[in-house]
Image (tube, rainbow, N blue to C red):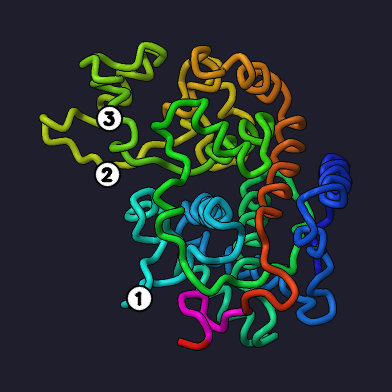
Amino acid sequence: MARPVMPAVAVAVCAAVLALAALGGGARAQELSPAYYDGSCPHVYDTVRRVIQEARAADPRILASLLRLHFHDCFVNGCDGSLLLDETPTMRSEKAADPNDGSVRGFPVVDDIKAALEDVCPGVVSCADILALAAEISVELAGGPYWRVMLGRRDGMTAHFDGAQNLPSPKEPLNNLTQKFADLGLDDTDFVALQGAHTIGRAQCQTIQDRLYNFSNTEQPDPTLDHAYLAALRQRCPAAAAGGDNTSLNDLDPGTPDPFDNSYYANIMRNRGLLRSDQAMLSAPEEGAESTAPIVGRFANSQAQFFQSFATAMIKMGNIGPLTGSMGEVRRNCRVVNWS
């Protein structure tokens, strides 16, 4: 499996996350290996990377979208590709759940990756592994850390609509969010690091309208928002009564919206976190920010520490409930199970 040449910092990150993967994640996670496809589909990495690079040329947002797909898959019944399943007369799709509907995107690119892999090694690479590879490649192409992806997941055979309804929300209190992460074996450092995925991508005005105009039903803006940033956001996202388009997009990291870097945390230190869940990590002590605020400060001061913690957290997240061995299947089409 061909790999890019790694700088020294990436080698250190890779060594750390592989050591972590060997220590934990449960028996099924231990069956995963970065070398899983070396014999059966040796060009899997290059194939996935090529398709993503082609998609990026047409849609610069696709890197953030593919990274988000992996999150939303793993947080619902484990990393089993269930998010990719289309709705059927007997099964509600996770795509239709409130946190995903009209929000998650990138499915046609996943289809293109799967089709390219089926051409070179049919029936070998699972859709769940495609999501894991696409997430790492997207981060790396955006200038972020590189890590060797643990592989060998198989695909689930049903979607979990109710579980998708309970995905972490940017409007939830901080302590609710950290508990949801903890329930999946992800600690506060993992949580703050994974929130750093917001260094790339955009969010719709509807996700921040309450912060701008009616925070906690006070009919006032969120008092933690920097005043100049608040004014700029209100220009982009007028109040609903003024006929504003609540689907307009805002950069999650306004200073450097496309490079994967640590400026997201510097924004939070200046009270310029776009989402409530971003700023709460620093500014909501009543919700547990005394645990997360020092981590935000550390990552704001050291991109290397952020990159290493992010890679570690991605390995841990990718180890959530994988199907391995004879469990599940390897779908021929990521949208439907094989027997349909």
Asked whether disc 2 touches disc 3, contact meaning CB atoms under 8 Å apart, the reply is no
Between 97 and 244, the residue placed more toward the observer is 97
Q: Is residue 60 left or right of residue 48?
A: left
Q: Which residue in the protein does label 1 denote?
A: 90
Q: Nearer the viewer, mark 1 or mark 3?
A: 1
Does dot 1 land on a helix, a strand or a loop? Answer: loop
Q: Quadrant of the C terminus?
A: bottom left
276 relative to 39, above or below: above
Q: Main secondary structure of the magenta part?
A: loop
At label 1, the amino acid type is Thr
132 relative to 217, above or below: below
Does dot 3 land on a helix, a strand or a loop? Answer: helix
Q: Residues within 10 Å of mark 3 (few under 14, many from 20)?
A: some
Which corner quadrant of the image does residue 143 belong to?
A: top right
At label 3, the amino acid type is Gln
Does residue 334 show up magenta in the picture? yes
Q: Which residues are magenta?
A: 330-338
Q: Nearer the viewer, mark 2 or mark 3?
A: 3
Q: Which residue in the protein does label 3 denote?
A: 209
Q: Residues within 10 Å of mark 1 (few under 14, many from 20)?
A: few
Q: Is residue 330 left or right of residue 252?
A: right
Tell me where residue 150 appears, x and y as whole percent. Answer: 76, 60
Tell me where residue 165 appears, x and y as whole percent. Answer: 39, 50
| Residue 274 visible | no
At label 2, the amino acid type is Thr
Tell me where residue 178 appears, x and y as whole percent. Answer: 57, 31
146 relative to 331, above or below: above
Q: Which residue in the protein does label 2 denote?
A: 247
Does residue 97 show up magenta in the picture? no
First in residue order: circle 2 vs circle 1: 1
Tell me where residue 111 appears, x and y as whole percent. Answer: 50, 74
Does dot 2 land on a helix, a strand or a loop? Answer: loop
